[in-house]
């Protein structure tokens, strides 16, 4: 009889975890921004890292005026983030005719921007079941002399 109680309790705990679902293993992603300028909201897009390019529909998107951003209840996986600060408030990242950003931009893993916009694979980070913290540097556009 005593052996049946632990087995019953184990089965009950296992069934309860199944009912709770994967959200029990989903942590938050906390993103700190370095280089945020005064004025202008920040737009952040979270995407799956296994894509060849940045999709139009991200996994999650947030807009905020705070330099500390929190993506809540993200299941474990490999992701990439792109961020831009909307300095003029028009809701889009403004680009030059050559495709260079006119507003501050940044990517997870802080890859070099010398070769142009990095792919999600160059911006990959792994998010586990616990909370993840990232620091993303925003690169301001170069001023004309």
Image: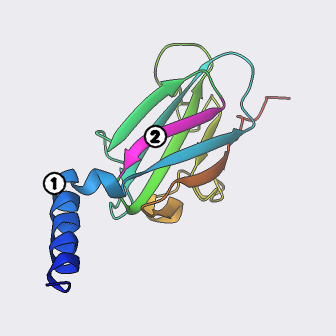
Q: CA distance from mark 1 to mark 2?
A: 23 Å
Q: Position of residue 92 (x, y in %)?
A: 46, 23
Q: Quadrant of the rendered structure where residue 139 is?
A: top right
Q: Is residue 70 magenta?
A: yes
Q: Secondary structure at mark 1?
A: helix
Q: Is 46 displayed left or right of 5 in the figure?
A: right
Assign the magenta stretch its main secondary structure: strand
Q: Say which of marks 1 and 2 sits in front.
A: 1
Query: Is disc 2 surrounded by few (<14), some (14 to 19) or many (20+) residues within 10 Å?
Result: some
Q: Which residues are magenta?
A: 67-74
- The structure residue drawn at horizontal position 38% and vertical position 45%, both measured from the top left corner, is 73
| Residue 19's disc number | 1
Q: Residue furthest right?
A: 145
The relative height of residue 130 versus residue 96 in the rendered view (above or below) is: below
Quadrant in the picture for the C terminus? top right
Task: Judge by depth and name the residue closer to the eye, 89 or 133.
Answer: 133
């Amino acid at each position: 009889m005593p052996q049946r109680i632990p087995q019953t309790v184990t089965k009950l705990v296992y069934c309860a975890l199944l009912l709770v679902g994967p959200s029990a293993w989903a942590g938050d992603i906390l993103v700190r921004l370095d280089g945020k300028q005064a004025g202008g909201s920040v737009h952040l897009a979270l995407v799956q890292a296994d894509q060849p390019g940045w999709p139009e529909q991200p996994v999650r998107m947030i807009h905020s005026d705070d330099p500390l951003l929190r993506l809540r209840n993200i299941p474990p996986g490999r992701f990439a983030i792109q961020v831009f600060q909307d300095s003029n408030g028009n809701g889009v990242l403004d680009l030059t005719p050559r495709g260079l950003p006119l507003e501050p931009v940044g990517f997870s893993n802080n890859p070099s921007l010398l070769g142009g916009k990095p792919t999600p694979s160059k911006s990959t980070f792994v998010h586990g079941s616990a909370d993840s913290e990232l620091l993303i540097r925003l690169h301001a556009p170069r001023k004309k002399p």
